[in-house]
Image: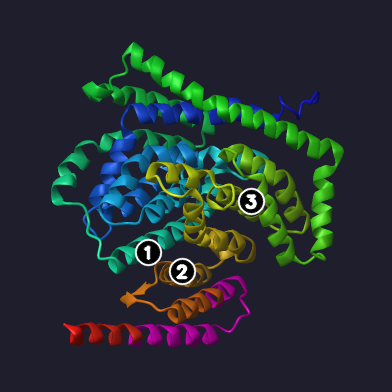
Amino acid sequence: MLTDSGIYGSITGISATIVALFVIFGAFFEQTKVGDYLLRIASKLTGASPGGPAKIGVLASALFGTISGTAASNVYATGSFTIPMGIRLGYRPEFSAAVEAVASTGGIFVPPVMGAAAFVMSEITNVPYLEICFRAILGAVFYYLALGLTVHLVALRDNLKGLPPEEIPKWREIVRDSYLLLPIVVLVYFLVKGFSPFSAAYYAIWTAFALSFFRKDTIMTPKRLVITFEKGARNMIAVALACAGAGIVVSVFTNTGLGLGIASAITSLSGGRLLPALVLLMGVCLILGMGLPTTPAYVIAASIAGLALTKMGVDVLAAHLFVLYFALLSEVTPPVCIASYCAASIAKTNPMRVGFISWRLSLTGYIAGYLFIYNKAILLKGSIMEVISVSILMTGVSYFLAVVNSGYFHRPVSSLGRFLSAIVVVFLVISAAWAKMPRNIIAAVTFVVLVYLLIKAKRSEKSLESQR
């Protein structure tokens, strides 16, 4: 605590500079009604399709979560609108809440902001921020692809409708208010031009301030300016305290050798083999991330898991993305799943049920975490064919996981059909992680299961027609 790596160490320093500025940036975004605009974009793109409200939640939470950086606050920001609407149109309260929790948590995985976690990762790993964002794209895409497909299949299974036309905004309204996204454009522009994250956030805040004068209900009057800064300061209190606490923990790990000791113990318990070590480290990350905000959850987990993985020869960026994913997935992993609890409070339903549904819906995030270690193509490294191959395999994983979670493939699927779909998921994941796995066997298994599901769907359709 008395050294320069404790309370007043680099973690608190990052929170007091980069993270603080992004929290203030988020407060300005909220005041200028960007959150409402993101909801309207999501409503226009997905609102009319089956189960539109849940899809709105998925898309809006991905867009809003990358800026807000905190799953719980993201749940309240977008979920207070999407969860009740989903329930009203036919989704079960537990499912509607779980979708929002998983979507809100995944916002931190979405470039270009990644909830400020990417900036902290850049400081710790010395990997450029823009490279981190670039390498993280595919993981985020497949996380939301699986969630969106599950929502769609559940909507088809339960014959759920979209929003009525009068509740969907017009394209002219979307285009008219598109200037609200200019601060994000400014942020990315300055980052690409080589400015520091601090400077880029600074100019983005001034842009948001200027844009507030374009509408009467968002003008930054002295009173609104004070409210905005107060909101930013209040949000920073929790982050600063958590980061100070994380600084103490990291300092203890560093100065006592505890971090090295745990890393050595994990290496010893795993017998030096990578897969058992990853399973143990996943558990460590999930436990250390319970109940913590994004930045301290990642920092504390990285002080042990990141160190252990780099000692085993794992690429630094792959190791830290693994840590980030599992530290954040603790938000939707029982027993302590804060985002799920928040969503359950809005839906007025059982939080543990929401937690277990959230865990199932977030399984693609678990798979992506392991693939960061085993397949460099998901980090957009390697040849174009390798990237295409892993993309095809992960698309199949996302779809069959959606079938397992929804129990629907053109028609409701039996327990056997879901079991076979789960087997396909396992084979596809092994194929994506292990290049030596014979691809013809994977293709044959997938084809057989697809044919089986199609035959069962056709028979079910004929049975329904005969009953009519």
Q: Residue flagged by tag 3: what amino acid is it?
A: Leu
Q: Quadrant of residue 6?
A: top right
Would residue 434 appear left or right of 93 to someone viewing this image? right
Would residue 305 appear left or right of 154 to someone viewing this image? right
Q: Quadrant of residue 311?
A: bottom right
> Residue 95, position in %: x, y?
40, 56
- Mark closer to the chain start, 1 or 3: 1
Would residue 216 appear left or right of 455 to someone viewing this image? left
Residue placed under numbered mark 2 in the picture: 401
For the residues bearing labels 1 and 3, Cβ distance under 8 angstroms? no
Residue 206 in sight from this viewpoint: yes
Q: Which mark is residue 286?
A: 3
Which quadrant is home to the N terminus?
top right
Would residue 396 appear left or right of 129 to someone viewing this image? left
Q: Which mark is residue 317?
A: none
Q: Which mark is residue 149?
A: 1
Q: CA distance from mark 2 to mark 3?
A: 22 Å
Q: Judge depth for marks 1 and 3 and give the one in front.
A: 3
Q: Quadrant of residue 222?
A: top left
The secondary structure that dominates the magenta segment is helix
For the residues bearing labels 1 and 2, Cβ distance under 8 angstroms? yes
Of residues 308 and 403, which is closer to you in this image? 403
- Tell me the residue at 50%/39% (across/down): 70
Q: Is residue 371 above or below residue 123?
A: below
- Mark closer to the chain start, 2 or 3: 3
> Residue 39, position in %: x, y?
30, 42
Magenta region? 427-455
- Tell me the residue at 32%/54% (across/down): 55
CA neighbours of label 3 inside 10 A, class few (<14), some (14 to 19), many (20+): many
Q: Residue flagged by tag 1: what amino acid is it?
A: Leu
